[in-house]
Amino acid sequence: MRRLLRWLPAVLLLLAAASLCAQPAPLPSVTVDFSKTPSGPALSSSLQAVLLLSILTLAPTILMTATCFTRIVVVMHFLRQGLGTQQTPSNQVLISLSLVLTFFIMSPTAREINTTVIQPLQRNELTTEQALDRTGAPLKVFMLRHTRKKDLALFLRIAKAPAPQTKADVPMECLLPAFLISELKTAFEIGFMIFLPFLVVDMVVASILLSMGMMMLPPVVISLPFKVLLFVLVDGWYLIVGSLVRGYTG
């Protein structure tokens, strides 16, 4: 089971890369065989169903936490909260934008997997085990590039794992949570910088209303158009999306 969990992110990224970099040639068929193994009989039908449902349940979580999706979607929600526009843009729009940017940022990794894993696998130059190992390598490189050493050392210490000598030696069960909290820290830092100009606008509007004696009028109602106008004048979407993408590709 531990071996299956270790390879699960690699399997999911391999399938994602195949969908992103699909060629006109037909893809090879995938068959899950639960027949008798050298160590004993196969799993029962009920255990097979539980295992399959577990993989399907964890697949979206692993795909989102092992990519740049977390940072982007958190920053987008900070932006909406700073603007004070309630449900505009809606959650569906923010998540869709985050997914599109995630596919754009992860496309070099997907192309590398397509070149080094999928195409050789189609030519029968690799075994399934070799393909899974090669799939995890580009993903580890991406995650390590954006993971703080402090966070990785924390989980290595908690797991009592030996210090890795190379990037390939970093265990995936320690890298995943370290990468995730590193992304959350970066997203909160960006969110703080986004909040500052909107906070200044709120304070200025509140001070003007207080000086005019209009204490019964909520400052948020008056400051909202000014915050939207400020965001449009500085071309906020261009600046924020550009900064997010350059944070991974720059």
Image (cartoon, rainbow, N blue to C red):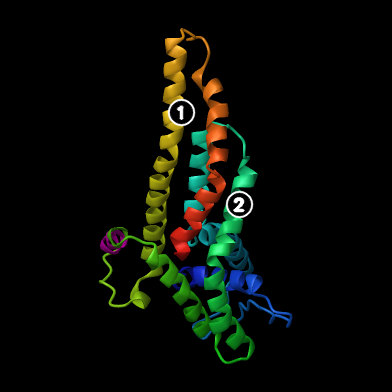
Query: In the orientation shown, which residue stands out farthest toward the top?
Result: 213
Q: Image check: 166 left or right of 232?
A: left
The answer to which of 210 and 64 lies nearer the viewer is 210
Q: Residue at x 51, y 49 (%)?
A: 239
Estimate how packed mark 1 is, as few (under 14), some (14 to 19) or many (20 or more) residues with alpha carbons within 10 Å: some
Which amino acid type corresponds to the residue marked 2 in the rendered image? Leu
Up/down of 121 relative to 47, above or below: below
Q: Amino acid at mark 1?
A: Val
| Residue 64 place in picture, x, y as percent | 53, 58
Q: Give the secondary structure at mark 2.
A: helix
- Taking the image as drawn, is residue 3 in sight? yes
Residue 21: x percent and y percent? 64, 74
Residue 80 place in picture, x, y as percent: 54, 38
Q: Nearer the viewer, residue 141 or 132?
A: 141
Q: How many marks?
A: 2
Is 138 magenta? The answer is no
In the image: residue 171, left or right of residue 163: right
Q: Residue 68 at what x, y percent from top left?
A: 49, 59
Q: Specify the principal SS of the magenta part.
A: helix
Asked whether residue 157 is drawn in magenta, I would say yes
- Seen at 63% across and 76% down, the residue is 32
Q: Which residue is mark 2?
A: 97
Asked whether the viewer can see residue 57, the reply is no
Position above or below: 176 against 21: above
Element class at badge 1 = helix
Q: Residues within 10 Å of mark 2 (few under 14, many from 20)?
A: some
Residue numbers of the magenta segment: 152-158
Which residue is painted at 40% across and 45% down in the image? Answer: 188
| Res 137 quadrant in image | bottom left
Q: In this view of the protein, which residue sits in the foreground, 143 or 200?
A: 200
| Location of mark 1 (residue) | 201
Q: Quadrant of the C terminus?
A: bottom left
